[in-house]
Amino acid sequence: MIHPIKISSTFADETRFSIYEFMLQQKQFLSVQDIAEQFKIHSNVARLHLTKLAEIGAISSEHLKTGKGGRPGRVYKAKQEGINLSIPRRDTSSLIKWSLELIQELGEAALSKAQEISYRDGKQSMLEQMKSIKRKSPFTFDEKLAMITKSATLIGYIPEVIEHDQSKTIIFSLFNCPFQEQISNYGEIVCQLHESYLYGQVDVLFDRHEVKKMESMVNDCDFCKYKISVHN
């Protein structure tokens, strides 16, 4: 077992954490040179960052044969199961599995109630974040975006804003689902609960909006993607 302090210290470096996030999005093997070029750093520095990430199990590596002879090059890829950091160590995977299995066994009524709870939790988390800022004037769009970005990042989403004349579109992409291990057996349930939480947060921030699912890991896509159109 890797000590939590080593994991946290590894991700304390801003560049290293950015490299890890980039690799999660790419979902493919990358070389030292790929990382060096992307982040405009020396290849030796890139290799050091990759080595540190591999030491804590955040990424995997293997030798790639080029077919041209010579020594095989090493390539790296982010592990999709992610890293659990808990002090003291707690294993919640069994509890999550039991809960999802119970929802599946009890059927539509249980799923509907679980979605209601997830939605309510999403709303409450956003209301608490807004309350902590302590201000009386209305929040601007950029301030609301900063709040949803902060919150969404914690549950795996990466937001992107596209501006139009009368509206703005927020594209939420999920490259590394925090419930990755449960997707194969309970994919539809996981996605619906994850969505409900996000919708709860969006409903608190924006009065007029439309939400549309564009991609889903359940449908063998590389990532999940949601489009939220916010009207001015």
Image: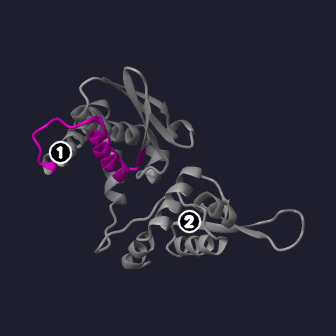
Residue 106 visible in the current orientation: no
Where residue 162 sits, quadrant-wise, is: top left
Residue 59 bears which disc, if any? 2
Kindly identify the amino acid type of the residue bearing the numbered disc 2: Ile
Q: Provide the secondary structure element on which disc 1 rests.
A: helix
Marker disc for residue 92: none
When asked about the image quadrant of residue 229, the answer is top left
Residue 172 location in percent, x, y? Answer: 42, 39
Residue 24 in view: yes
Q: How far is mark 2 from mark 1, CA to CA?
A: 35 Å
- In the figure, 2 relative to 156: above or below? below
Quarter in which the N terminus is drawn: bottom left
Indicate whether residue 220 is drawn in magenta: no
117 horizontally vs 105: left or right: left
| Residue range (magenta) | 133-158
Query: Residue tagged by mark 1?
Result: 130
Task: Please give the name of the residue rendered at 32% of the width and 50% of the height, measured from the top-left corner.
Answer: 150
Secondary element at image label 2: strand
